[in-house]
Image (cartoon, rainbow, N blue to C red):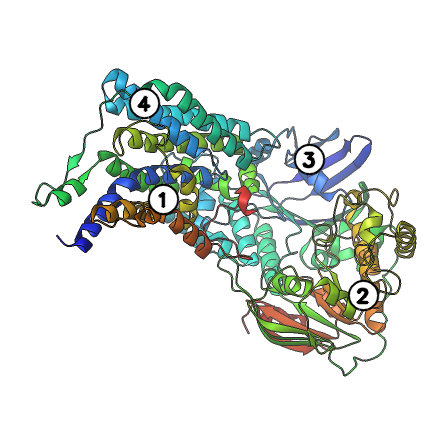
Amino acid sequence: MSALAVEAVAISKRFGAFTALADVSMKVAPASVHALLGENGAGKSTLVKCLLGYYRADEGSFLIDGREEIIGRPADADRLGLGMVYQHFTLVPAMTVAENLVMSRAAVPAVIDWGRELAALEAFMARMPFRVKLTAEVGTLAAGERQKTEILKQLYLQRRFLVLDEPTSVLTPQEADEMLSLVQGLAHGGSISVLIITHKLKEVARFADDVTVLRRGRFAGRGATARLGAAELTAMMIGEPQVPASLQRRGAPMAAERLRVRALRTAGDAGRPGLAIDTLSVFPREIVGIAGVSGNGQKDLAEVLGGQRIAESGEVIVAGETYTATRAEAQARGVRVLPEEPLRNGCVPRMSVSDNLNLRSFDRDAAGAPRLWLDGAAMAERARRMIAGYGVRAPSREVPIGVLSGGNVQRCVLARELDGEVQLLIVANPCFGLDVKAVAEVRARIMAARNGGAAVLLISEDLDEILELADRIVVMHDGRIVHQTPAAGADAQTIGAHMLGSH
Amino acid sequence: MGALETVTVAMVAGALRVSTPFLFVSLGECLTERSGRINLGNEGVLVLGAMVAYATSYHTGNPWLGVVAGAIAGALLGAVHGGVCSLARVNDVAMGIAIMLAGTGIAFFFGKPYVQPVAPQLPRLPLGFWASAPPVKSALSVSPLFFIGLAAAFAMHWFFRATRMGLRVRIVGDSADAARALGLSIDRIRLFATAAGSALAGIGGAFLSLSYPGSWNEGLSSGQGLMAVALVVFARWNPLNCVIAALIFGAAGALGPSLQTVGVTKGYYLFYAAPYVVTLVILAATVRPGRALRGMPGELSIGR
């Protein structure tokens, strides 16, 4: 078993009138780690899907170990030894690691002799540089363990070329470092070649030997990572040598507590513990960042504060009074929520952009009194103002909001939630899936809200985002707050250790 | 014998007797739901199975052929459900209700001529031969179908754990994404699971008409097919738990009749409602808002 050389030559792929890839070439040397870098929508996934037989390239060809191969369906890629670890894992959560591994094989006997299979799997694990408990149910594993299982599965299937799709997006810094060094070790040991799809420059610099950059479906550059700097790679990625402006933090937090969570408990889901937060405060003109590995209660917290989940006990206090997230309370006390997956949690997808922009205020008149009839002219005017103010790109005000791109949906929800006087802003994963420009814009808006006197609770799985935005960092693990630190001088490694609950 | 003993013996008898159809239907529903699809049509399958089994037994003189025919009829009706549900934009809950109505309708239509005639019944195993008291003797005369059901529960448990097909059913039921990545044919596996599950429900129907109560009429089923859905929730989609759940429901179902035998003349009919009350209590106790059920197949439409 030895690593494969994989080359893509002048690949083009069109979907109708849209050209997803135009004349893209890439060369992955055997036993190397190659990074495929680009923004969302740059065509990275399309290229890889062509390589693995999920799509058929319209033009161009693939060379595997120098021989041209036609990869018409995923089974062809399997046969050649090409495998992929997806961003959304493809393991079955309710089955054990052993069951998942055995069922991933091409040939499974009709009746499985578990005694023999487990012995064979143990022998396989013993040869691997890292292992996972075979009898553990996948759903109970941490994200890092799951990803390791995915990689083990590919090795178990004797793959010699492995694609990792945004492998570190769900991992803590420690897990990410560990996993990528392991993969790098495997590649440099000569058993596999690795292609990492990513948009994180740090990972490219540390773990990749070579890099290919795509921009809007076109080839934008390549080279050995040792000779390329971050500025050059960024320029290749977004087409202009711009560094996102650093955020201006103005003024210190004020003394009067705006949000206080006390003894909050929720019921857990499917074996996971629920929330158990003893106390959490946010002050005006302060961003408190909640860090944690996905699935450690951050989502529950956002849902309780946003009124989507009922707490079993405890209290949420906003501006000195109990807050139960009713519409009236939210309007009276200026509580706004920017939920994760805004299209699902913060919009009515089939209603128009204009209607969605007015969801907070359509039932109140200018003085804040309830109104019975909608004021169409005022709603249209407000929508126009928000669309212009936030640079929303939409075919018209009247199209359903569901047809807009992720970045534009996020702009719409931001515009709506930051409209008027904001006292408390709850934000969850605001930049997930956005491109570099949109990310910079969204972060600037959140910082502006903070500078304007709002108390901001920022829940994010992206530790870099928290380190950039927050005044104070709170780490959650298993539904509890396990660590608090001022953001100035905070150490990512220490925070990561707390995220893993190993401190 | 004291009244308490009489009631106890009657409830044990009921648990052994009344539980059998619950056991078969819940095992069938369990198999179907583990593949990620819900089948509310099992009530119709049960009634159709009862009718076909009774008619076959009457014409051939062999009640066991009736059981086989009931299973085949169930599998066919289940296959219709499975086939239609694999079409785009078909909701399995709505389709299940249609199958339920179709199954009972077909059974009543073709079953009219069999209400009067008497068909040969399934034999019983006299496990109470050692006892002298007649109520104990009759309580322990158990249908072999009960033991076949028990064996089926253990077989299904093994099937889910150690066979390729069983693991495929679980994959399809738990994560359609993973199933697609493995190249499994989701629709075909669900079709198989639905047809096989309905065959089991058909056997449950055969028990109703060929063992207990042991006749064919339009009021034969008292909603066992629908209550099986609740039973499977209670059993946490585990075939072995289905046995326990079926026994509890059977005992609850025997409460009313057994109170009647000891001379409770007023209000005993309220206890006829015991299985339904148990259903409600169990559902209320096990289903809590804001929390996903443990053991629930991830692809089940009612859970998403």
Q: Secondary structure at mark 3?
A: helix
Q: Residue at x 57, y 41 (%)?
A: B177
Mark number displayed over residue B239:
1
Q: x and y percent of residue B19 in the render?
A: 30, 42
Question: In the image shown, does A73 or B232 lie closer to the viewer?
Answer: B232
Residue B295 visible in the picture: yes
Q: Secondary structure at mark 1?
A: helix
Q: Which chain's residue wears label 3?
A: A
Mark 2 residue type: Ile
Q: x and y percent of residue A13 in the render?
A: 76, 33
Q: Which chain's residue wears label 4?
A: B
* Residue on which disc 3 sits: A50
* Residue on which disc 2 sits: A446
Instruction: Report crowding for label 2: few under 14, some 14 to 19, many 20 or more residues within 10 A (C-alpha).
Output: many
Question: In the image shown, does B27 or A285 lie closer to the viewer?
Answer: B27
User: Marks 3/4: CA distance?
Assistant: 64 Å
Q: x and y percent of residue A424 in the render?
A: 76, 70
Name which of mark 3 and mark 2 comes first in the sequence.
3
* Residue on which disc 4 sits: B115
Pointer 1 and pointer 3: residues touching (CB < 8 Å)?
no
